[in-house]
Amino acid sequence: MKKYSIQKHIDEIKTNIISNILWYIISLLIGNIALWIPLIQGVYNVVHKSGNTIPLYAYILAGASILLLTAIILFLILVIRNDSLKKERDIDDSSQKVNDASSNNDYSDIPLDYKFSSIIAEMTFDDNRVDIESTIDYKMLVLKDGVNELKRQLIWSGSEYIRTELVERNGNYSLDDSERALSPFPYIIKFNENKKCGDRVEFKTRTLVKDGNLSMIPMYSFMVKYQIDKLTLRIIAPKDMIKNVKKVVYADSAREICVEESKEIYGETIRDLVRYTFEIKNPALLYNYFIEWEFTNP
């Protein structure tokens, strides 16, 4: 039988206590109306100088019920306020730990099974905005015996995800593609053997997607979840398809916490295409590196 842990259910317990107190206050309000009526009548009699008198105990009961209700409401306010302040402190502490690890690239507290000497992620537009290809080239060093797979995930904002496949490899690797109909699309690269510490693994994936309804968010990003010596992001598009191409770094995938202001990227012309590159040496842990742009014809 599993042992019940109060610490794991502390938020649930607090919610139930607060909910019960609220219901108690409502019940107390309803039940105390009978006690408050004599008090209201007494005040009315004093104001209008009526001859009717209210017994002393009625005043005492009404006053006691008001004090009790006030005390409960104040207690509830303090509980909610303290809980809110604690959550804010916890969030600040967590954010500080992430920022410290990210700014120092400190991986000492993270169990590392592998690291990457290089990851090159590239998005290429065909001669239109509908057919899009993304390739990621991995060069990995195994740091622990027994590593046999790498789990990845793709978030796509366009109209259709087609597939992800292996196009290059230095071993007998395979890929289990996502079966989901909606984003995100997780997939697994399987090495089909247990790698040893010191083994080098190299492979390249290709993802095919479509944007038939032109709904994609104009950005290409990579979240750093591993130690990477060099990360490269590239966008390749026909001339005059995109403009205002910028590189920017966020602490979150929602692009709400900007840690490095956007800077313009100047493209490199290759025949009828333009290539935009964002290179990062030793990217910070848990940071999100973006290339953002605007379409010339939205």
Image: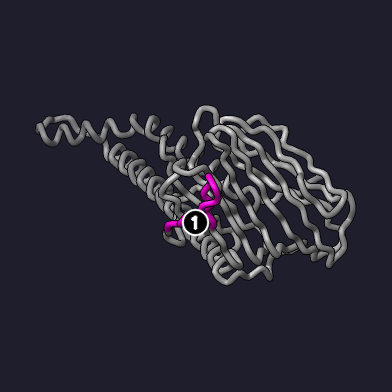
Instruction: Using residue 280 as the reference point, say whether residue 195 is left or right of it.
Output: right
Magenta span of residues: 264-277
Towards the viewer: 280 or 126: 126
Q: Position of residue 7 (x, y in %)?
A: 64, 53
Identify the residue shown where x is 69% and y is 51%.
5
Location of residue 202 (image quadrant): bottom right
Instruction: Specify the principal SS of the magenta part.
Output: strand
Identify the residue shown where x is 83% and y is 57%.
147
Q: Position of residue 271 (x, y in %)?
A: 54, 48
Q: Position of residue 113 (x, y in %)?
A: 77, 61
Screen quadrant of the N terminus: top right
Identify the residue shown where x is 48% and y is 54%.
267
As for residue 274 lying within the magenta part, the answer is yes
Residue neighbourhood size for the residue with mark 1, other residues' Cα within 10 Å, grouped as few (<14), some (14–19), many (≥20): many
As for residue 127 lying within the magenta part, the answer is no
Amino acid type, label 1: Tyr
Towards the viewer: 83 or 207: 207
Identify the residue shown where x is 31% and y is 39%.
62
Residue 252 appears in the rendering: no
Towards the viewer: 31 or 204: 204
Q: Which residue is mark 1?
A: 250
Q: Secondary structure at mark 1?
A: strand
Instruction: Using residue 32 as the reference point, say whether residue 184 is left or right of it.
Output: right
> Outermost residue toward the top?
213
> Outermost residue toward the front?
271
Residue 196 appears in the rendering: yes
Instruction: Using residue 70 as the reference point, say whether residue 200 is left or right of it.
Output: right
